[in-house]
Amino acid sequence: MSETTLIPYGATSTALEVLAGVDLSGRRAVVTGGSSGIGLETALALAGTGAEVTLAVRDTKAGAHAADRIRQDTGSGNVYVAPLDLDDLNSVRAFAGDWNGPLHILVNNAGIMALPELTRTTQGWEMQYAVNVLGHALLTLSLHDALCAAGGARVVTVASSAHLMAPVDFDDIHFTRRPYEPWTAYGQSKSAGILFTVALAGKWATDGITANALHPGGIMTNLQRHLSVDQLRFVGATDEQGNKLQVPPGWKTPQQGAATSALLAASPLTEGLTGRYFEDCQEAEPQPAPAPGKTGVAAWAIDQNAAEHLWKNITSELGL
């Protein structure tokens, strides 16, 4: 992709629009968390291009329902479901170990948000960082050979504008000393996801593998399941009685929320692009004053030194 390439899509574009006319026959894709929300819509759009798509999901029953819908909507018979629990390293290793052949597209889409109480994995890791960062990092690194074999493979990580809330606190990533705060933990995990993308882009460039991250926008999905009733009322879900609550201006449908993922995963317009952070189907502008509710990318999320520090931290924690 040329630096001057015009991408004719924006905040209201959908994943299907972004990939209209794209032919990925013979290509293979994995979408984590592909049973609902923007993961489902991303998988549906990829399957619609002729790609073989595997939904890597924690709930395989929900994954099977999603796969049935994708097959019905696209007519594709190449949609599969495989178990993947990102807070269980054995599950991640099993998924990667069971994968055979090349992998052209890996969409690290699954995630958890704003757990109200400090929750730890069996390793003692803070759960949001464990799932959003370490689980996906292990998955990606374990699939390196498959991605390398594909020739021109793409890794796409769903981050968030929430990264503007918090940089990575390398002195206390897992909240062993500082008080736990749900949004700080979530924001940190999303900053880490972007930094991992920056590191990956540099280290795997000679393998022909590109890596990019994105903010999908505000979308009401299962990601919001840990929010309080008052928070849900603000973001536009339903109250405890099931009454429809107003969605604030600027929020997206899941189809629109999946557009940037689809663009980076499969559009010829982003071929060769690596180490970037996108929002609304465009590369994000620098944000000089990061804060909640703003757009753009914080310097702390794309800093090369911080990316290298994170890489060493991740490989150490994972024992790689």
Image (cartoon, grey):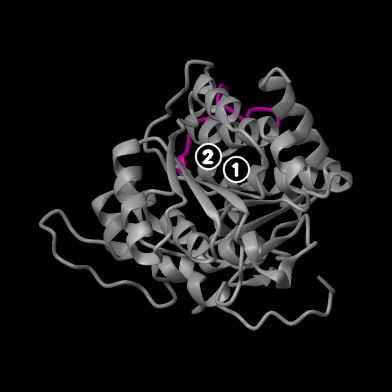
The residue lying at 58 percent from left, 41 percent from top is 189
Badge 2 amino acid = Ala
Q: Main secondary structure of the magenta part?
A: loop
Pinpoint residue 165: horizontal percent, then vertical percent: 58, 52
Q: Is residue 301 magenta?
A: no
Position of residue 250 relative to residue 93, above or below, is: below
Mark 2 crowdedness (10 Å alpha carbons): few <14, some 14-19, many ≥20: many
- Bounds of the magenta span? 170-182
Residue 103 located left or right of residue 15: right
- Dividing the picture into quarters, in which one does residue 215 lie? bottom right
The residue lying at 40 percent from left, 78 percent from top is 249
Quadrant of the frame with the C terminus: top right
Q: Nearer the viewer, residue 268 or 240?
A: 268
Pinpoint residue 307: horizontal percent, then vertical percent: 78, 42
Farthest-out residue, left = 241
Pinpoint residue 75: horizontal percent, then vertical percent: 39, 63
